[in-house]
RNA sequence: GCCUUGGUAGCUCAGUUGGUAGAGCAAGGGACUGAAAAUCCCUCUGUCGGUGGUUCGAUUCCGCCCCAAGGCA
């Protein structure tokens, strides 16, 4: 049996579709989401509730504290054994999530090296970027790894730093690493093809619902429990905006507009990312059961 | 009814001492290999409120009209 991957932009209805697939095909849901891994971030991440899970087993949700940082590598380390275990038990893994980068970490074996992240190195280069400029930092990369420098825009400081970090840690150029992506498992991927306007309307409705459900209170609670404002998870849409608003009440009236705006941009980036995914099938919007049957035709 | 100010991109506005216009935001497209809900790159758009006049040429100057805001009655 092939793996099933339910992807697509935020607010497109991935959760219910994944649950329907899991129940119909004897599967278990493997969340591929960079924020659902955090405990305590529930409302703003639209984390599936027990009712929504409807009895289907879910994995990789609530696996780290909100004070911790997390990376694709951490995700890969956690996810692969889970997928293997599901397979070993004769069940079908139903990957579900909006973080394409994370989903790819399960679906493909990359020729990527094992240079870890090093906070001290990152800080060092961040300081250089700040004091001497992005162009200077980029020139530094050009010296040790011209090919990577060529691919990266000087303004993309995070990636420039990562390339520098890889070189400093391993002595190898990032560009010299094999970037071919070999599928780990046979799979078929699906995304609901909403019309852009409809998707945006859904984003609007969902944002309103989150605010009603107490998103602001959730953020306050997280902060009160000791999660720092600059914690990685606080970069999430819906959370970072509320943090700002709590500091400047004048922004309160525009809160939902800002959150929706950022969510729309995020949805667009997701669409761009998923368009390239091999074996992706776009489903016409319909009832969950209809779409589930459509999926069945590809398995 | 009178006076004043304004009407330029989806929004907020800039500008042209007369040669058919540009910023920010929004929107669209793209990149992405250990921060990815992050980070970054690229691009579009206009009957310049309407209508006459002056002019080789008007969005710009003049007249009239319409609309909005404020003020006076």
Image (tube, rainbow, N blue to C red):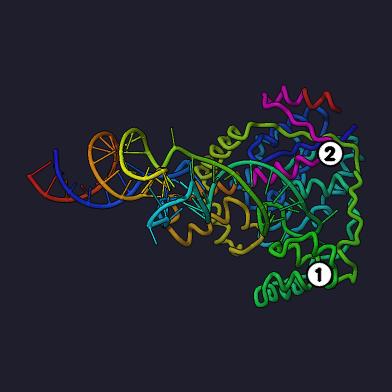
How far across and how far down the image is residue A275, in percent? 76, 40
User: Which of these two is toward me, B37 or A141?
Assistant: A141
Give yes or no for contact between labels 2 and 1 (Cβ–Cβ under 8 Å): no
Location of residue A6 (image quadrant): top right
Q: Which residue is tagged 2?
A: A278
Q: Determine the chain carrying the residue at label 1.
A: A
Side of A237 where A55 appears, left or right:
right
Q: Which residues are magenta?
A: A266-293
Parent chain of label 2:
A
The residue beneath circle 1 is A142
- The answer to whether any part of residue A256 appears in the image is no
Mark 2 surroundings within 10 Å by alpha-carbon count, few (fewer than 14), some (14 through 19), many (20 or more)? few
Q: Eyeballing the image, is A168 above or below B53?
A: below
Q: Residue at x 58, y 54 (%)?
A: A239
Do the residues marked 2 and 1 share a common chain? yes
Position of residue A137 measured from the top left corner of the image (x, y, whole percent): 73, 72
| Residue B2 locus on image (x, y percent) | 14, 44
For the image, the number of numbered tags is 2
State the mark number for residue A158: none
Q: Quadrant of the C terminus of chain A?
A: top right
Residue A3 versus residue A36 in the image, above or below: above
Q: Residue at x 87, y 47 (%)?
A: A108
Does residue A139 appear anywhere in the picture?
Answer: yes
**Dot 1: few (<14), some (14–19), or many (≥20) neighbours within 10 Å?**
some
Residue A270 lies in magenta, yes or no?
yes
Residue drawn where x is 74% and y is 39% of the image: A7
Which mark is in front, 2 or 1? 1
Q: The N terminus of chain A lies in which quarter of the figure?
A: top right
In the structure shown, which secondary structural element does the residue marked by tag 2 occupy? Answer: loop
Distance from the alpha carbon under mark 2 to that under mark 1: 32 Å
Residue A173, percent from left and from top: 88, 66
């Amino acid at each position: 049996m092939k793996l099933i991957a339910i992807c697509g932009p935020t607010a497109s209805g991935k959760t219910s579709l994944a649950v329907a697939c899991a129940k119909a095909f004897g599967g278990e849901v493997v969340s591929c989401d960079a924020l659902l891994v955090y405990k305590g971030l529930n409302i703003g991440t639209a984390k599936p509730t027990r009712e929504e899970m409807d009895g289907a087993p879910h994995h990789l949700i609530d696996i780290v504290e909100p004070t911790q940082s997390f990376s694709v590598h951490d995700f890969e380390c956690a996810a692969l054994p889970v997928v293997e275990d599901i397979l070993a038990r004769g069940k079908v893994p139903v990957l579900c999530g909006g973080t394409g980068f994370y989903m790819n970490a399960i679906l493909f074996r990359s020729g990527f090296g094992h240079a870890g992240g090093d906070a001290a190195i990152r800080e060092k280069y961040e300081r250089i970027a700040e004091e001497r400029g992005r162009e200077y930092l980029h020139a530094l990369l050009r010296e040790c790894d011209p090919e990577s420098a060529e691919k990266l825009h000087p303004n993309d400081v995070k990636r420039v730093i990562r390339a520098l970090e890889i070189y400093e840690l391993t002595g190898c150029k990032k560009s010299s690493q094999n970037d071919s992506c070999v599928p780990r498992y046979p799979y078929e991927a699906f995304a609901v093809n909403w019309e852009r306007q409809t998707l945006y309307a859904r984003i609007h409705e969902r944002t309103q619902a989150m605010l009603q459900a107490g998103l602001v209170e959730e953020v306050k609670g997280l902060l009160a429990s000791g999660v720092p404002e600059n914690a990685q998870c606080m970069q999430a849409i819906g959370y970072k905006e509320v943090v700002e608003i709590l500091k400047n009440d004048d922004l309160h009236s525009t809160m939902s507009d800002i959150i929706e705006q950022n969510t729309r941009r995020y949805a667009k980036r997701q669409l761009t990312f998923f368009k390239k995914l091999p074996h992706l099938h776009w489903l016409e919007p319909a009832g969950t059961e209809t779409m589930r049957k459509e999926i069945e035709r590809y398995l």
